[in-house]
Amino acid sequence: MKTIGILGGMSAASTQIYYRQLCQLTRERLGGLHSPELLIRSLDFAEIEALQMAGNWDKAGEILNREAKALERGGAGFVVLATNTMHKLADRMMEGVSIPLLHIADATAGAIQREGLHSPGLMATAFTMEQTFYTDRLAQAGLAPVIPEAPDRAETHRIIYEELCRDVITPQSEAAYVAIAGRLVDRGADCLILGCTEVGMLLDQDNVPVPVFDTTLVHCDAALRLALGE
């Protein structure tokens, strides 16, 4: 088994899901007392969030690059960046790093294509929904993402940063997310990408009327398959 290098903490809430999910998948796949071989570098999200809001992506990129190199030195076989938004800096992060990055958008696009779907709705941070670093990657894979209208983008983003990243889950926010997902379906989405690693705290297949692709779970599955050489 290759060692999975996880760069997380952005937020800590979703990184905990990565750890639990990878442990569960490994038990299911290998049985017995098996658990995944992991290196986890968890950053202080307050520093990263401040850089995001200030638009200081250069500094954030320096931090991610430093940490990816640390994972490589520690013996990781590949890097998993446990956040959708920070894939904006994927190329900068991997400069001078010889081990590969398992890109979250590529893993998600592959899962959608295997199901024969084409037009995923995307619920994520404003950075991921409104900038092109993520949607272009989906388009390159032959998908046609559907993005929420501006008010829904703002509410999706607010709930992520003000609530989910702080482990706050409320019925009101779940209802808001369900309604936003429904509007995406009404506009032609044939599936839904939970495109922020915290969105799965509120949405899943039980409250969304189309197939759901939780990027955290998809990413974990792809990481374990890569670690096992499948």
Image (cartoon, rainbow, N blue to C red):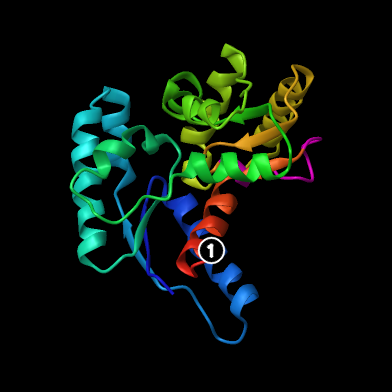
Quadrant showing the C terminus: bottom right
| Three-letter amino acid code at the position of disc 1 | Arg
Q: Does the magenta segment cover residue 108?
A: no
Q: Nearer the viewer, residue 105 or 11?
A: 105
Q: Above or below — where is 45 with respect to 85?
A: below
Q: Above or below — where is 50 with respect to 34?
A: above
Residue drawn where x is 57% and y is 23% of the image: 155
Q: Position of residue 119 (x, y in %)?
A: 68, 26
Q: State the image quarter where residue 215 is shown.
A: top right
Q: State the image quarter where residue 204 is shown.
A: top right
Q: Nearer the viewer, residue 170 or 57?
A: 57
Residue drawn where x is 31% and y is 35% of the image: 89
- Principal secondary structure, stretch drawn in magenta: loop
Q: Above or below — where is 211 with respect to 39?
A: above
Q: Does the magenta segment cover residue 208?
A: yes
Left or right of residue 183: residue 17: left
Whether residue 197 is visible here, answered yes or no, is: no
Quadrant showing the N terminus: bottom left
Magenta residues, start to end = 199-210
**Numbered-mark total:** 1
Q: Position of residue 85 (x, y in %)?
A: 42, 35
Mark 1 Cα shell of 10 Å, populated few (<14), some (14-19), many (≥20): some
Residue drawn where x is 23% and y is 67% of the image: 74
Q: Residue furthest top?
A: 150
User: Helix, strand or loop at disc 1?
Assistant: helix
Q: Position of residue 153 (x, y in %)?
A: 56, 20
Residue under label 1, please give it: 225
Q: Nearer the viewer, residue 66 or 51?
A: 66
Residue drawn where x is 48% and y is 51% of the image: 13
Q: Nearer the viewer, residue 148 or 139?
A: 139
